[in-house]
Image: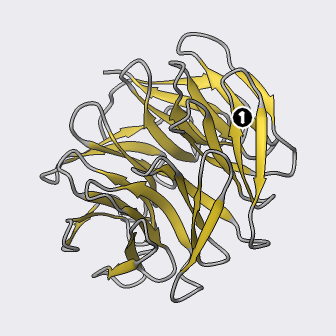
Amino acid sequence: MSGALVQEHAVAPGAYGVTTGPDGALWFTVVDSGRIGRLVPGGEPRYFDVGPDSGPTIITSGPDGALWFTQYRAHRIARLTVDGSLTEFDLPTPSCGPYGLAAGPDGALWFTETTAGQIGRITTDGNVTEFPLDPRDAFPSAITAGSDGGMWFTLNQANAVGRIDSDGDVTTFPLPTTGAAPVGITLGPDGALWYVAIASGQVGRVSADGTITELDLPDRAGRPHAITAGPDGALWITEWAGNRLSSVTTDGVVTGYDLPTPASEPHGITTGPDGAVWAALETGALARLVS
């Protein structure tokens, strides 16, 4: 793999999701200790306690200028202002396992309920609507807004990608490879949806009409986990078992960048406020790819 420089910035162990906030800082979840971290590139991290048993997981910037995140263990959606004011919203379905979260085109946030088999919608004032999926054991995982006005999500245990519209109507698209177990999904620079399949070691592309194209990664055992659109017109992924970050161009060229620390367990990935690619490492760091 490429020897490009990757810098690691130490943070608390258990770093998982990461996003760029509205204040020009990186915000990340710390699952192990129940905290949200904030890091200005070049500075030191600051932390906000959100409950030791809450399990903060995926974090995103909301349409209201706050940070929103899922609490997987506490089964809540939470809102955190940039100055640290926390509001938590209990979900109607108990033990639902909220995981993926993304802002929608309707001004609300949409999320997945892994163990309940539902897609949820929450307004910025906390009004929640839930939409059951079929089958209920599909384990919906990541979710993102598409270019077509719908929300697109992965169905990890149903081996499919799904789309839900603002009325709650769901369409599913089965993946060609059996047992692929898709997790991360994002809107690509070409207007298509791109996902990573953790079990099959693949990246996939889904066009607006549901046509799926699969790309085998060089390391099929790398267990790709998260994916984001990068600043360079490529898709960027974390390979959890491969201990690397990889870029994938829209025409299928893959370039890998090994992480300096062995077995660092990369999870979430985003474009940072400095225009670089950043990833959260569960062993306790944020990694920055130096161009």
Residue farthest along the bottom direction in this orientation: 135
Q: From the viewer's perspective, is 227 left or right of 65?
A: left
Q: Locate the C terminus and report the quarter of the image it occupies.
A: top left
The answer to which of 275 and 130 lies nearer the viewer is 130
In the displayed structure, does residue 134 sit left or right of residue 97? left
Q: Quadrant of residue 34?
A: top right
In the image, taking residue 212 as reference, residue 18 lies left or right, namely: right
Residue 282 vs residue 188, the one in the foreground: 188
Q: Residues within 10 Å of mark 1 (few under 14, many from 20)?
A: many
Q: Is residue 93 above or below residue 225?
A: below
* Quarter of the figure with residue 175: bottom left
In the rendered view, does 164 fall on the left or right side of 202?
Answer: right
Q: Position of residue 136 (x, y in %)?
A: 59, 86
- Residue found at x 67% / y 40%: 29
Residue at the (53%, 71%) spot, across then down: 140
Whole-percent x and y of residue 189?
A: 21, 44
Q: Please, which residue is most extreme toward the left here?
A: 251
| Rendered residue at 35%/61% (across/down) | 195
Q: Residue at x 67, y 13 (%)?
A: 44
In the rendered image, residue 112, in percent from the top left (x then y), is placed at 57, 65
The residue carrying mark 1 is 36
- Toward the viewer: 258 or 266? 266
Looking at the image, the residue that sits furthest to the top is 42
Helix or strand or loop: what does disc 1 sit on? strand
Q: Give x and y (percent) for residue 166.
A: 42, 65
Q: Amino acid at mark 1?
A: Ile
